[in-house]
Each structure stands twice: as structure tokens, then as C-alpha cells.
Image (cartoon, grey):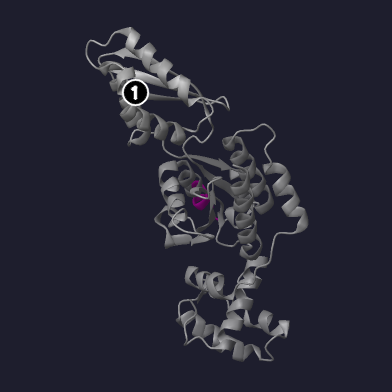
Amino acid sequence: MLREDYNTRSLAILHQIVETFLDSGQPVGSTTIAKEGLFNLSPASIRNVMAELEEAGLLYSPHTSAGRLPTEQGLRLFVDGLLEMGNPTKEEQRKIKARCKPKGLGPGAVLEEATNILSGLSHCAGVVSVPKQTSPLQHMEFVNLGNLRGLAILVFQDGSVENRVIAIPAGLPPSALVRAANYLNARIDGKTLEQAKTLIAKELKSEQRELDTLTKQIISEGLATWSGAEAAPDTLIVRGRSNLLEDETVVQNLERIRQLFNDLEQKKELLSLLETAKEGEGVRIFIGAENKLFSLTGSSLIVSPYKNDTGKIVGAIGVIGPTRLNYARIIPLVDYTAQVISRLI
């Protein structure tokens, strides 16, 4: 949000400083801005404006030179109010569509391909949260583990398998597990987990006579596990970590990049951050210390939610890189990739 007390000239100079910094990675001096010839101001006049911007917390001096760099607050003002964005190029759009288009692949594989191409095009680390299984079910089995515990094994049509531990009633005969599996397998083939859950819950109420008490209890336990806290959480795919080493400032601050790599391993925290991007439409940008996950590394996360075939937001995809990113190019790339996979999964 632009503050009213930032006049047009100050904002224009801030815009030019940030653009120059994002392009060069170096502190920007008043002489450099004056040479651009955009403002018809002397270096002295530009220095006065830069001093005002520094006092406002939008610029800082990394050392005693006259050059200035944007602060995270300055980058935020730039991204929110000064950035001019277009669309991905035709070639970028073609590459994203070609890489994401499924060729007999399940949704998880499509998301992995999308993350790879996004990482490659942005030269950042690509990240995506993969939602709970959305592929249609194919088969289900129950195995008695002993100690009143059982294992529900779900096989999906894309070849993936998920195991859920369920409670087993005392004295349960092996035949009850077989009957429960047969009952479910007659109904779930070709349905998503959510569709199967809805159907079985409805039938349990209307066709109770078909099932004995113990068999019905096994099925109910399975349903409770599918919908409860023990259900498999979203998973996280991270690709292109090596791209983070391309930033020339890494050589000067290897500790920062080590910390960032450590942050990327903390998948629970990163998943939680991506979860916030699923709360609304459009691209979200997190810059540096705005999020505690990247508070020590000076990194930015650009992320956009994506939807399933019913229009429901089910995950988020984006990139992580240094705060010195080409925001004008990468934000549309992330947004476009999210739109493409929303049409495919």
C-alpha cells in the first residue's frame, strides 16, 4: 500500500533504485540514477531524496559508500505498488504447458513436473504442496496387526499406495476383515477417496442389514481414519535447490545459504507457510523477515494456490529465492503455472 506522504518523485526514484538493484545486485548511487536521465535532477538532489527514503526505512547503506540498497520494507512497497508486470512469454507458456500436460501421469507426477519447469524458468528453488491423494481408488485391503490394531491398505489407480492404522475390535474374526474389504471394493473402484467416503457413509445408514456389527465397525473405523487427524497430510516437493547457489552474493555469505537449505528441510514449517497461500485467490509474496521461516536468510517466497477439477483450492505452488528476484517476470510465471495445473489435475 502506497503511503500518501511518499510523493511521486520519491516513489519514482525508489522504483528506479530497486529496478537497478534487482538487475545488478549492487548498491545504487545518486550518480547512477542521475545518468539514467529520467528525472532531470542533479546527483545532489537525488541524494537528498535517497536520504529521505533511507530515513523512512525504505533504503539502507550496506557500508560507507554513497550507494543504497532497498530494505525489505522498500521491496514490499515496490512489489505492492510500483511493480509493472506483464505475462509470461509465448515460449515460456509453451514450455510450461508441454511439461505439465499429463501423459498417463497421475496428479502427483504432474505437480512434480510443474515444479521442475518452474524452478528451471525462474532459476530458483521450486516448491509445491501436494494434496491428499486425489487419484481414483482401485482396491483396498485390511490386515490385522495384533494388539487391537489393523492396517487399511489403499491402492490408487495411479499406482500409489497409502497405509492407515485403524482400531480393531477385540475378538474380531479374520472373516470380518475380508467381508469389510469385499464390501468396500464393490463400491470404491474408480472413485476418489472423498467420493468413496461420502458414498460409504451414506450406505452405512441405509443398508445396515447387509453388514454384521463387527464388519460395520471396521468400515466405520476406516472412514473415521480417512476423515480424521490421522489422514495423510499434504506432502511437499522441493526442486532446484542448486539454483540458489547461482546468486553471486552467496559466495560472500555461505552461512545464509546453509541456513536457507536447512529451512527447506523443515518441510513442516514450509508446508504451513504454503497453507496460508491456500486461504485466498492470487499470488502471495513473502519477503525476508515477513515470515519467521526465512527471517535469517533474506529470502523471498512467491506462491500461488491451485485448484482441482471442482474449483476447490487444494494446494499451492511457487518458488523460493533471494530477495533480489526479478519479481516482474517470476510472479506471472508462478501465477500462470498455477492456472495450468488447475486445468490438468
Stretch of the chain drawn in magenta: 253-258
Q: Where is residue 147 in the image (x, y as percent from the top left)?
A: 25, 14
Q: Residues within 10 Å of mark 1 (few under 14, many from 20)?
A: many
Q: Nearer the viewer, residue 87 or 252?
A: 87
Single out the residue that lies furthest toward the left.
170
Q: Is residue 153 magenta?
A: no
SS at badge 1: helix
Going by the numbered disc 1, the residue's amino acid type is: Ile
Please state which of residues 38 and 211 is positioned toward the viewer in this rendering.
211
Any part of residue 106 in sight: yes
Residue most extreme to the top: 174
Residue 115 lies in quadrant: top right
| Residue shown at 69% from the left, 51% from the top | 121
Query: Circle 1 is placed at which residue position?
Result: 219
Q: Position of residue 79 (x, y in %)?
A: 55, 69
Q: Quadrant of the C terminus?
A: top right
Is residue 257 highlighted in magenta?
Answer: yes
Q: Quadrant of residue 8?
A: bottom right
Q: Please determine whether, in this image, residue 105 is positioned above or below residue 209.
A: below
- In this picture, is 156 found above or below 182? below
Q: What x and y, as percent, mark residue 237?
A: 54, 40
Up/down of 260 relative to 283, above or below: above
Question: Of 39 and 121, which appears nearest the observer?
Answer: 121
Residue 219 against residue 130 in the figure, above or below? above
Horizontal arrangement in the rendering, residue 52 relative to residue 331 (left or right): left
